[in-house]
Structures are given as C-alpha cells and as structure tokens.
Amino acid sequence: MADSGETGGPVKKDGIQQAKTEGKELTKEEKQRLRKEKKQQKKSKEKKDEKASQESEKEKKPVSSASPASQPPTQPITPKAPSAVPTLVPVPASETPAPADKPAKSKAEMKAERRARQEAERASKQGKKGEVGQQAAPGKPKAPPSELQPVVKRLPEHVQVDNPEVLKKLAKKLERQQIPLRSDYGYKVSLFSHLHQYSRKAPLTQQLSIPSTVIHPAIVRLGLQYSQGIVAGSNARSVALLHAFKQVIRDYTTPPNEELSRDLVNKLKPYISFLNQCRPLSASMGNAIKYIKKEISNIPSQCKEEEAKSKLLNCIDRYIDEKINLAAKAIAKSSIEKISDGDVILVYGCSSLVNHILCEAFEKNRKFRVIVVDSRPRLEGREALRRLVQRGISCTYVLISAVSYILPEVSKVFLGAHALLANGYVMSRVGTSQIALVAKAFNVPVLVCCETYKFCERVQTDSFVSNELDDPDDLIVTRKGKTQLEHWQEVPSLGLLNLVYDVTPPDFVDLVITDLGMIPCTSVPVVLRVKNVDQ
Amino acid sequence: MELQAVLMAAGGGSRMTDLTYNTPKAMLPVGNKPLMWYPLNLLERVGFEEVIVITTKEVQKMMSTDPKMKLDVKMKLDVVCIQEDGDMGTADALRHIQQKIKTDILVVSCDLITDVALHEVVDLFRAHNATLAMLMSKAHEFTETVPGQKGKKKTGEQRDFVGVDQSGKRLLFMANEADLEDGLSIRKSIMRKHPRMHIKTGLVDAHLYCLKKAVVDFLADNKSISSIRGELLPYLVRKQFSKTINSQKVKDDTEDQNQIKNDGSTNHELLISSRDEPLLKLAQERSCWNDHRGDMSEAYHGGKLRCYVHIMDEGLCYRVNTLAAYIEANRLAPKLFEEPAVHPSAVISERCQMGSDSIIGALCQVADKTSIKRSTIGNSTTVKEKVKVTNSIIMHGVTIEEGCNIQGSVICSNAVIGRGADLKYCLVGNGQRIEQEAERTNEVIVGTDQLMEI
C-alpha cells in the first residue's frame, strides 16, 4: 500500500504544482491532497528509518516500559506478523515526536536492542518447533513465544470512554476526518462510565455545515435516522447502510491519479466514523462494511470506473439478497417445522426475522397463538403486535414484569438476535436474557433465529463490558401533566441508565436457527471458521 | 450537493409602500445593514457557499455598491434578475430558474430576520425524507407605536390556520381565513389517520422552506401555480392525504369529491420516488419504528408525500413586511450581533448624550448637546446641535438641523429636517424637506408623486 503511495506522490505533486503555477486557487480537494502527500512523504521517510528500529521497539516493550513517543502497540505481535508498514498508517499524529527520538538513541541502547532482537528471533524459532509438537494438545497456549512477546490486544475505542488518552486520540482522528465530536450527556452510572451516552436532543448535525460537503448527504440522512431511531433493528440498519453506500458509490468519481480500489475505501472511512458517532455500529453493519471494503479492494486496477461501479452495486444487491432476503426465507422454512398446531409462542420485542417467520407460518396454515412481551422505554412490542394482528394472528400482549405469570401457558419461545458471539452467547435487546432465564426455569424451549451475517468474532460473557447506552431522558414519563424526573440531573446521587443490549449464555438457548441449518449455540465458532475459510 | 439556497429578493413591500417608494424592500436599512443581509448572513453562518438570489435590476445595482454586502458576504451570489413590474409570484420565479436547480432547495425570503438553528428545519427534511419542511414562529405583539397609524390596530389581518399532529412536527392542515368562507372543514381521511390535531392561529410563517427537487419539476409542468405560500404549500399539504397517492378505495364523501375537483386542475402528478426504492422500502419494513400508534397502518400511513414544520418557541423570528415589523426589527436586530454600537468612522462630539441602545452608522456627524436615545442613525447623516432624537429610525444621508425634536419617527433617506422642527410619530418619506419650526404629530409626510391614485 505504501509503495504505491510513493510512486503516486511525485505524480500528484506535479498536478498540484501545475495548478499553482497556473495561478488558480487551490481548492479544498487539492489542499487535502497536498496534506496527504506531505504525510505520505513523511511516512516513507519514517518507514525507512523505522524499519530498522521497528523490531527493536517491539522488543523494547516487554523489556522496558514503552515510551509514549514510540509507536503505540497497534498490532498484536505474533511470530508470523509481516510487520512494519500497516502499523504506520493509523497514527500519523504521533509521527512527529518519533523522529525526535532517533538521534537521542545512544550506541549502548542500539546494542541492547540488537541483542534483544537476536534473543527474540532465537526464541521464536524454538517456539515454532514447540508448536508442531504441541498440536496434539489443543488447550495449551503458545507459551514460548508469548513469554517474550506478550500478545497485546487493543481494546476497541468505544469501551474506553473513561480513559482521557483514548478520547484525545479519538478527537484527533475525527478532526483529521473533519467530523464533529459528539459530546457525552448526563451523569453516567459508574458501572457503565466506560461507554458513550448521547442525548437525542443534541444531534451531530448541529455542528455540521448544512449543505454537507464533507459527508455525503445520504450518509448524513442515514446518521440522523439512526440517532433518532427511525431506522432501528439490526437488519433494517444494515439494509439502510447498504442503500446509502449504493448512493455514495453512484456519486463517486475517481480523482485523477488515484485508484478506485484504494480511494473509495479511504472515502468511506470518515463516513463510517460519522455513523459511529451518531449511533455505535451494530455487528451486522460491521460485517457488511467488511464485505464492501473487501469487494472494493478486490477490484482490478485496469477496470474502468463505470464497470467497477456497476460491479460494486451488483455486489451490494447480491449481498442483501443472499444474506438477508434468502436467509430469511431459509430460516422461515426451517422454523416452520418447529411450529406445530396448537402452539403458544412467546416473542420479545420487535424482531423483523421472528415476525417474518410467524407470518410465514400463519400463511402455511399452522394454528398457533402468540404472546408478545414488551418492555420500557422502547415499547417495541407494540409494533410487533401491530404487524402480527394485521395478518390475522391472535396475540396477547404483556409487559416483561408479567413473564413468569404467562410462561406456564407457553410452549415455545422465539427470540431474535442482534449478534451471535464467538463463544455462543447471544447478544440481543435488553430483557432477552431475562426471558431466556425464566423460560429455562419453566423448561420451555428457547429458539434463537439469527442470520449468519450477524455472527461476530467478539467474545463477551457479561453485559457490562461492551454495550450501548441510549438517551437517559427516554426513561422520563409524563403522566397527568406531571413529570417527576424532569430535573433528574440536579439530584447528585441519581443516575438514569438506559441499556440497549444484553447477552444470554448458551445454556439457556436450546437451538439457533440460521440459514445454514439448525445448530446448537456452541457451534457458532465452527460456522465462523467455515465462513472465514470460504472467504 | 445536498441543498441549494434560493433567496427571494424581488418582493415589492406592498404593505409598506411609504418606506419602499425609493428604496426596494430588500435594501431597506435595518440596524444600518440592508435587509437582505440578514438572511444571507444566516445562510453563511450555517455553511452555505453559494446562493441564488432572485431580484430586480435595481436591487442588483444597489447590492453592488453597498459596502456591507461587498465586504461581509463571502458567499458566491448568483444574481438572477426578473422584471420588476411583471406579476411574477415566488413560484413563477422558481420556474424561471428551474434550469439552475440540480438538487433540493432551501427557499428564503429576503425579509426574514431570525436566529433559528437552521439544522432543526433541515433535520426534519432529511430524517423523514420529507417533501416540504418549513419554519414557523409564535407571533409577538408589536408594542411600539407605528407612525401614521390612526386609531387602534386593525384586527382584520387574515389569520392563518395551521394544523399539526400530536408531536407538533407533521403539518396536517394549512389554510388562510380568506379561503374558508363557510367554516373550517377537515377531511375525514386526515381525521382517520391523525385523530389528534392541534390547530394554531397565532403563528408567523417565516417563509423559509426546504423543498424537494421533484416539487420544482412539478412547478415547471404546472404553470397555474404562481405563489409558493399562497398556492403551492396548501396544495402539498392537501396532497399528503390524497387518495390517488395512497389507497385505491373509492368513497362517497362529498367534501372529498369537491377537493378532487379542485385538485383536478393541477393534473400533473407530483412524482416522489427515488432510485433503489425497493431497498428503502425493505429498510422501512424491517425497521421497528412507527411515527404513530393506535391503528393498523405502517409508518407514515404508507404515504410518500410528507410535510413537516418546525415551530420556534423562543428566539427571534421577524418578517419585515409591515411598518410595525420594520420598527420592531430595527429595535431588536442589532442584538443578534456583537457589533459596536458606534461605527468607528462616525464623528461624535463629546457633549452628546448617547444611550447604549442606539446605533450610529458610518461617516455620521453628531454635534454638541444632542441626545440620542433608543435610535438608529444611518450612514452619512448629519445631526446638528441641540437635537433630541428618541425612539426613532433615521436612514442614510439625512440632515437634521439644530434644535429639532424627533420622537418615535421614521425618517427615510436623504430627508432634510428644518431647524426647530418637532416631529412625533411621523414618517418622513424619501428626500422630503420639513420646513423650519414645523410641528407634526402622527403624520405620514411624503411627496405628492408617492400618493396613491384613486
């Protein structure tokens, strides 16, 4: 990636110098390009210098405490890591202090680095030999190499809100991409103070210019719809995201001397940051973005722009068709086998997939009735209720506080999922784990319906570590003209918590119905592995 | 590009002819800035870089010579001139510039002075994919005495009836009192979909509209619509619930049939559709959001045409189209900006008593022993000794001789007030001379050529 940047650099420079000499004022794009070039030139200079000291720095970390000016541990150090170049890309801001360090290194330090490097290489060779012998024992971790080079996994930024350094980095990154930073709102409950909490009354568009030039208007509209909750639900958000990306791709023109496969990906990055600021991305959206980025970077460089764009648009259509529409059909077919006549099915909240399944089953003349369980403050169950009743299905509506009273009547529980984690946990709307727990206590089978594109490689065992905090003012209710919680911010010991997601352990889930078939919850890592091999 | 701004500056100021006789309404000085500077400043602050200005040749000439416009307005102004005397309504003007319009538009009137957070209106337009989003404000009573008004203020100004839904954002009904001869009737289809409607009358329409591009194309086909506020808006609001767009059911409502007859004259359909319509529909279907509850229909009742309104509770919003509004605006507009009250180039002698809420324009000369309170003095004005100016608006190039006493009056450009004159609540027209020792109260002093012909 960086190599082409170097060759691209001088060519670009000519273009801009031409413009300068012609006396035209540099437009915004050209200024941005100039900035980019300068950065790339700096990077290429650094790269040459740093390649030598890169490995030694990596060794330095376990040996001595990492100096803040050195490259931050952005990559997990594994024995097969090809190294240097990609780590330089994300943090250009810290480049400037780095060159200042180099002249300060004395001969003694360089000797120590060289020695440490040699030891590490020796140890890694040993470790590789050890691995081959140890493959029979699956549980043993790769001990020898990790002793010398501990795997440094980076925590995602969105769960480190109480760390001021991370916040500063985020602010710098957003500034670079010209996206405003959304400020947190209200007192956060201490257990969740590491998460963002935004207010719906302070939209991000307040700080944007109105005919938005930095961000494509379709993305601004999408961000607004996310933050106001007009587009809610995992599938809806992914479809809306892909729709917006289609418009972006249609309106995109490759700047001269750039390649579509690289430039388009770079163009999408600020949009994704913007959407993240409006509302944290869901797992399904993350997978969709990964797919699109892969498709874009796989476009051959000799492909013409029109052809490339139509190819990308077709890819997006195909993705939606396969992963969402056809998957829904397949899941409906499988789950109809599980619904028998006379069933009483319990559903929670409004899951588009579960509603689809129930409507299909009703069309196929299965006789069942549905109990819709709802919870505040979202009260999404009302929408589910409307859709089911519109089709003619007989429904009962209760709040989650009545679930243990209603469960003796229930024969099956169908739940939707926001994401399925790699350790078999189900991440879904807050309250789902409660329903699963009570159902387990009553020995009622719990079936989770989830498409495979929502499977994600994260691992979580509790709902605290990574979650989403919604606007706390949603919890405020006005009854008979009185709003008791109106001035909740003035009470120092009061915090309002509006969680969005929770995780359900696999012990409570009996079956997961996916488009690949009906699998137990613990087979999720297998599916993930198979998916990775396919791709 | 997302939005194109269009500034309508060709209006004649028909409700304040005394002021606009010589100076077109768009260039009337308010707080020593031309009136059209205020909406342009609003657009500039929000981030617009280009504005299409529809105006007359006269205004264009004045704009190019006005120092304030040249220096302060950094946006690119694309001036389109139209005939001054032709009855070109605002919709006709839009039709005239249809070729320049490539995307959705934001139409602003030149007489709007407001400090609204524009993103509130535009967010409604974006988030709900609306066809129309407009701004309205609660009307404020004008407290200042208007010169030349005899007797109590007439209540006859036609009221506007605006119906909004429960959330206060969706526009359901809009009509002017003049069109409702035999009572206010609301269609059953509206009541079925929105059983709770709030009807408000005390609202001021700010004439700030976000319109979809499809509306401009529709205007090009339908030449019978000539005014945005008077005809286009009520049409769009009615069309939201029109049967042709929504359902195929045929009902025998006599009122509905009448409406269909009225709508039948505009027979070209307003096509609201976008590419990837099926994807949008899929996203909406899968989303668990609904804008209303209690009935069996989906979000927006399946309607594609939606009109939204943002009603400002607090903050400044004035439309300077009457004399009373003009006086009020002069009082309040300077508070919008942090500018020094006295222009640095004005020459003010030390023994002048100047109140803190007065504004003195550039190149003024104020002599000794004068007292200026709560007034606005325009550029290049000369105020001689022993003059008392209270609560008044003095425009550019006026000469006020010694010993005058001016109270609650409006003195237009280039007027000369003779020595010792005493004016209370008067309006002195352009270039008029008031003789010495004159005493006028509550009069409109204009030239004979300005008087209307009966």
Image: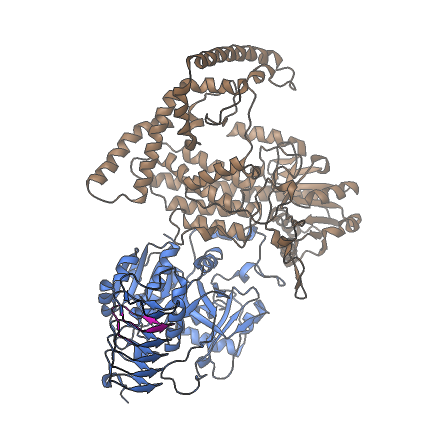
Vertical placement of A146 versus A241: above or below? above
User: At which x and y percent is residue A4?
Assistant: 34, 28
Q: In terms of image quadrants, where is residue B414?
A: bottom left
The location of residue A179, given as percent across then percent down, is 44, 44
How many numbered markers are drawn? 0
Question: For the point 58% across and 31% down, which residue is it?
Answer: A528
Q: Residue at x 32, y 70 (%)?
A: B352
Residue lying furthest bottom in this view? Answer: B454
Q: Give yes or no for residue B376 being in the magenta stretch.
A: yes
Q: Is residue B134 left or right of residue B57?
A: right
Can you see residue B270? no
Residue farthest toward the left in the current orientation of the protein: A22
Residue A402 appears in the figure: yes
Query: In front here: A443 or B156?
Result: B156
- Residue A65 relative to residue B77: left or right: right
Please tell me the colour of chain A: brown
In-image side of B240 versus A389 (left or right): left
Q: Give the percent coordinates (x, y) of residue B274.
A: 42, 55
In this structure image, what is the colour of chain B?
A: blue
- Residue A85 falls in image quadrant: top left
In the rendered image, the quadrant that contains the C terminus of chain B is bottom left
Image quadrant in which you'd find residue B440: bottom left
Counting from the top left corner in percent of width and height, residue B163 is at 52, 71
Depth order, front residue of A119/A63: A63
The scheme the figure's colours follow is: by chain
Q: Does B337 appear in magenta?
A: no
Magenta stretch prevailing secondary structure = loop
Closer-to-camera residue (B52/A240)? B52
Q: Which segment is the magenta one?
A: B366-385
